[in-house]
Image (cartoon, coloured by chain):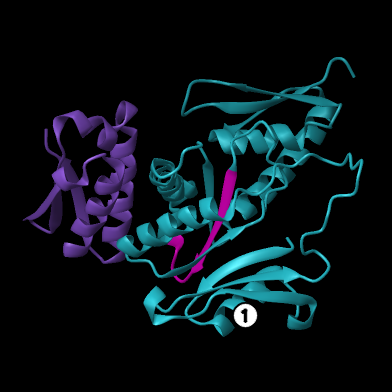
Chain colours: A purple, B cyan
Amino acid sequence: MEELERLVEYMACNLVDDPEAVKVESSNRGQMVIIHLSVPEDEMGKVIGRQGRIARSMRTLLNTAASRRGMRASLDIDD
Amino acid sequence: MHSVEIQARSVEEAVRLALEQLGRPEDEVDVEVLVDADPANDGEALVRVTAKGHAAQPVAAGYTGPVQADRPDEETEQIAKNVVTELLDAMGFDCQVMAVDNPSAIDVAPDEPPTVFIDVNGRDLGMLIGRRGENLAQFQYMVNLLVNKQLEIWTRVIVDVEGYRARREESLISLARRVAQQVARNHKPVPLEPMPANERRVVHMALRNDDSVVTESSGEAGNRRVTIQPNRNS
């Protein structure tokens, strides 16, 4: 679970201009790990992208990393 | 391909992988150790292996062969390799990552953005490719964002995993040629399956010099496909 947090943190911190302001936490919902990502409002576009394209890419990578470890995960971007 | 750079746990391991990649015996190559396996560098060695007779070969004066863009500089390639390695590591994959010469049958034209080609090899990477390469496409998209965040000039990074793109390109080229023959014979257009942009481009390029057919893309994003049509002017 910590590893999945680290993956989301790696992506988000390298996408935004102010990595210090990135927060990543996780929780469980049944068998599923939920990763909560929050970034400053003016940097939301950098983790979501046009038509959600960046968020979609982050989710695919998160799912791949989770299934590799026999887990299921989902990404929540807090606004 | 005449030259590769490979990172591995030891110089011997890196050289072995490089020879495999080049398909040449050790006495036909020159080996440069760029970084020795130093614990200060996470114990990773980096070597460049070049086929003999190909090192820094000057282009003959007045050379008018196909124009192919140069490989981006080493620093750019290193940034791309680092991003791919770090991202794969964060995802839990342990792989060899290397920058290679353009492996595609299609050249990078001089008016296209500089392009780094990255090959990823390792065990159990099927999940990284995904159904119809969808996971690989998303991985490559993320790599491009992260790499370009660090670069001044917009640079394209094309990531292949276990030769997936290379195999796909080969089968697309043979499909295109087979369908083109059929179209030329029957004088009826044939639409292909919807494909992503890079794959449509392979089809267009594969038939560029075939005068018996023309190729055209149509349809909305996500459902765009190439149709191979008889060339009425031939």
Crowd band around label 1 with a 10 angstrom C-alpha radius: few (<14), some (14–19), many (20+):
some
Give the camera-side residue of B79 and A74.
B79
B109 relative to B9, above or below: above
B216 relative to A41, above or below: above
Q: Is residue B149 left or right of residue B69?
A: left
Q: Secondary structure at mark 1?
A: helix
Q: Is residue A6 left or right of residue B13?
A: left
Asked whether B176 falls inside the magenta stretch, the response is: no
Magenta highlight range = B115-126
Asked whether B122 falls inside the magenta stretch, the response is: yes
Give the camera-side residue of B198 and B144.
B144
Q: Main secondary structure of the magenta part?
A: strand
B62 relative to A71, above or below: above
Give the camera-side residue of B134 and B5.
B5
Give the x, y percent position of residue B171.
67, 49
Residue lying at 67% horizontally and 38% vertically, measured from the top left = B202
Q: Which residue is mark 1?
A: B16
Give the camera-side residue of A45 and B224.
A45
Q: Is residue A1 visible?
A: no
Residue lying at 25% horizontally and 46% vertically, measured from the top left = A12
The answer to which quarter of the image holds residue A49 is: top left
Residue lying at 32% horizontally and 47% vertically, measured from the top left = A60
Q: Is residue B84 visible?
A: yes
Give the x, y percent position of residue B177.
77, 39
Give the x, y percent position of residue B12.
58, 84
Residue lying at 89% horizontally and 39% vertically, measured from the top left = B64
- Quadrant location of the C terminus of chain A? top left
Q: Is residue A3 left or right of residue B80?
A: left
What's the residue type where badge 1 is placed?
Answer: Arg
- Quadrant location of the N terminus of chain A? bottom left
Image mark count:
1
- Chain bearing mark 1: B
